[in-house]
């Protein structure tokens, strides 16, 4: 990115962030795939474009109701703020120009269905993020109402699931209530739209931040990395559905004898290819669009 004269700010597991003046960021989604907070050596073709295209899609769907940090993914528009970007073809389709936010130190998870870590906790203790829930639920069962279940955002190690009081102790009760309303509102609308497309939005994680004092949606929005999305006709109570997320990859990973510490195992080419197809399918099923029509190189 030195070609574009931008200062590198941060490299996360998936994204690279660059400064555009004081108030904006270029967020580049790579094809990196992580599991248990370890990044695999093999990239997943199309993943960065899928994450970016889905974030753009959802942000536009709800832009009148939900403020967002995202400004544009259009390379021609980005070029106006970052001269030379139009020529950087490898970045097209995977790059967002966003307003720089002061991030809320919470992962704002919303759960419509019992799955993942929430299921493990429920089986062990009968609670979800320490909160009481209906008895007798099985894997994939819907909660009576979607639950706002935040976690901490740890700089090292795994995020910790917490209850609402613990979250309020971190960001304040009023801010937490505001975050909860925003995230539940988004989730309910997105889940209804997914249902129309024959999909179940089981859960998702939002990241919120403050821009000029306003709480806005940041980062990725309703992507396969941040969400569990299931084909509705294949969801059975008590069974793991074939999700449009990293599940096929995770299943493969679970068969490897790996202690979840670096270095990660070598991901075989067929698993890379299944996973890539899965990401593309997620975009196409959710949006009804072809990824080939999105910015960037295409397949
Ligand atoms: N508008 C924004 N302003 C400032 N920071 C943002 C904004 N949107 C997203 N971020 C931050 O940018 C980073 C994106 O990088 P990435 O998605 O790779 O991180 P991650 O691997 O999920 O998490 P980690 O930050 O723990 O590495 C996150 O730390 C996220 O909180
Ligand atoms: Mg992230």
Image: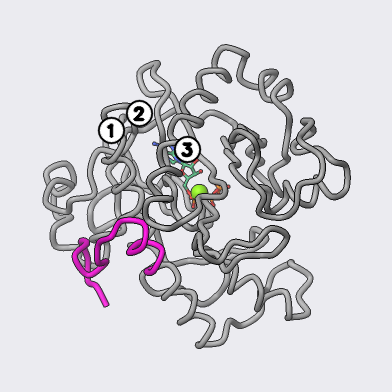
Which residue in the protein does label 2 denote? Answer: 66
Task: Pinpoint residue 53: horizontal percent, then vertical percent.
Answer: 30, 55
In magenta, the rendered stretch is: 280-299
Task: Pinpoint residue 221: horizontal percent, then vertical percent.
Answer: 42, 45
Q: Is residue 181 magenta?
A: no
Task: Pinpoint residue 114: horizontal percent, then vertical percent.
Answer: 68, 48
Q: Residue at x 56, y 50 (%)?
A: 202
Ligand 2 within 8 Å of the CB at mark 3: no
Which residue in the protein does label 3 denote? Answer: 187
Q: Earlier in the sequence, mark 2 or mark 3?
A: 2
Which residue in the protein does label 1 denote? Answer: 63
Quarter of the image where one finds residue 65 = top left
Q: Residue at x 43, y 34 (%)?
A: 186
Task: Decide: few, some or many residues near mark 3? Use Cα within 10 Å; few <14, some 14-19, many ≥20.
Answer: many
* 239 over 266 or under it: above or below: above
1 vs 3, front mark: 3
* 288 over 172 or under it: above or below: below
Q: Judging from the image, what secondary structure is the residue with disc 1 in?
A: loop
Left-right relation of 267 to 275: right
Q: Residue at x 37, y 69 (%)?
A: 280
Task: Decide: few, some or many residues near mark 2? Use Cα within 10 Å; few <14, some 14-19, many ≥20.
Answer: some
Image quarter of the C terminus: bottom left
Check contact, mark 1 vs mark 3: CB within 8 A: no
């Amino acid at each position: 990115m030195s070609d574009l004269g931008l200062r590198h700010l941060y490299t996360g597991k998936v994204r690279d962030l660059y400064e555009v003046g004081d108030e904006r960021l270029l967020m580049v989604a790579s094809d990196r795939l992580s599991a248990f907070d370890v990044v695999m050596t093999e990239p997943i073709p199309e993943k960065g474009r899928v994450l970016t295209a889905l974030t753009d899609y959802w942000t536009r769907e709800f832009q009148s109701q939900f403020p967002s940090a995202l400004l544009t993914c259009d390379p021609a528009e980005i070029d106006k703020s970052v001269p030379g970007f139009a020529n950087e073809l490898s970045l097209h389709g995977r790059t967002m120009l966003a307003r720089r936010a002061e991030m809320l130190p919470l992962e704002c998870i919303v759960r419509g269905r019992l799955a993942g870590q929430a299921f493990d906790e429920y089986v062990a203790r009968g609670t979800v993020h320490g909160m009481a829930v209906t008895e007798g639920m099985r894997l994939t069962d819907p909660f009576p109402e979607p639950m706002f279940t935040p976690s901490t955002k740890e700089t090292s190690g795994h995020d910790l699931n917490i209850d609402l009081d613990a979250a309020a102790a971190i960001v304040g009760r009023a801010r937490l209530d505001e975050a909860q309303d925003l995230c539940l509102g988004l989730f309910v609308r997105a889940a209804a739209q997914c249902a129309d497309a024959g999909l179940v939005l089981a859960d998702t994680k939002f990241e919120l931040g403050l821009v000029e004092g306003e709480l806005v949606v940041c980062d990725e929005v309703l992507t396969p990395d941040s969400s569990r999305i299931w084909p509705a006709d294949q969801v059975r109570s008590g069974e793991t559905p074939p999700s449009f997320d990293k599940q096929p990859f995770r299943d493969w990973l679970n068969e490897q004898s790996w202690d979840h510490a670096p270095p990660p195992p070598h991901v075989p080419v067929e698993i890379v290819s299944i996973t890539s197809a899965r990401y593309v399918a997620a975009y196409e099923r959710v949006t009804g669009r072809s990824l080939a029509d999105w910015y960037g190189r295409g397949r």
